[in-house]
Image (tube, rainbow, N blue to C red):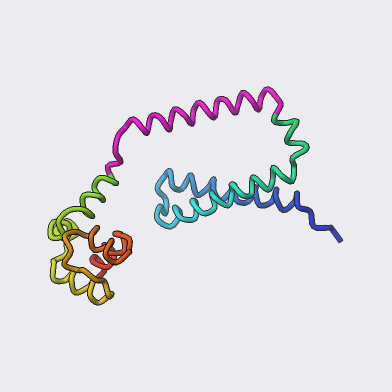
Amino acid sequence: MNRFKFKDLATSLTTLIFLVVGISGVMLYFKIFNGQVKELHEILGLLFVAAVVLHLVANWKPMKSYFKKKIFIRVSLIVVVISAIFIFQSANIGNDPKGLVLKSVVDAPIKSSLEVLGVDYESAKLKLTKENIQNVDANSIGDIAKANSASPFKIIAIITAK
């Protein structure tokens, strides 16, 4: 009977989670099942980091000598430089347009936001009241969310539900 080996577990987890994160990353890039895949990709991405740490711990002795190789150092530098370029480039672009639109809808006067969402004021008030949302006469969706310790997304979901 084979004995359970920590190294085998760490390597198996790292490999399998890498495959799922890699495939889901490609799916996100090409916008295939975007909504369904995003959460899976994010959560497994976190688990992948943990699996890699386990893999490094389990294989520390052979990894130490690998980290000293010139090729590892060169590739590491290339990855750091490319990552820095992407990070600094995206930081210089300015505000995220989606974020600006969302913030505008959340912070705008409630009647303006409802018009953008295609919902009439009385219908929105009724839906919010049915869900036990307080302060439905607030100035904005953001104010309603704050008054109820809720996410603005939750308020928008209630308002736009059929």
Q: Is residue 143 above or below residue 61?
A: below
Percent x, y of residue 76: 59, 28
**In the picture, residue 96 is in which quadrant?**
top left
Q: How many labels does the image show?
A: 0
Q: Main secondary structure of the magenta part?
A: helix
Side (left or right) of 19 relative to 85? right
Q: Kindly identify the residue that appears in the image at 76 percent across and 52 percent down.
A: 6
Considering only vertical position in the picture, is 159 above or below 49? below
Percent coordinates x, y for residue 151 in the rendering: 32, 60
**Residue drawn at x 23%, y 55% as measured from the top left:** 106
Residue situated furthest bottom in the rendering: 130
* Residue that sits furthest to the front in the current view: 147
Q: Where is residue 11 in the image (x, y as percent from the top left)?
A: 70, 48
Q: Which image quarter holds the N terminus?
A: bottom right
Range of residues picked out in magenta: 68-97
* 64 or 14: nearer the viewer: 64
Residue 119 falls left or right of residue 35 = left
x and y, in percent, of residue 69 in the image: 71, 25
Q: Residue furthest right?
A: 1
Tell me what residue is drawn at x 77 percent, y 36 percent.
62
Left or right position of 161 against 118: right
Q: In this view, does 161 lie above or below 143?
A: below
Query: Quadrant location of the C terminus?
Result: bottom left
Q: Residue 65: which quarter of the image?
A: top right
Q: Tell me, yes or no, whether the highlighted magenta stretch contains residue 76.
A: yes
Asked if the stretch drawn in magenta spans residue 6, the answer is no
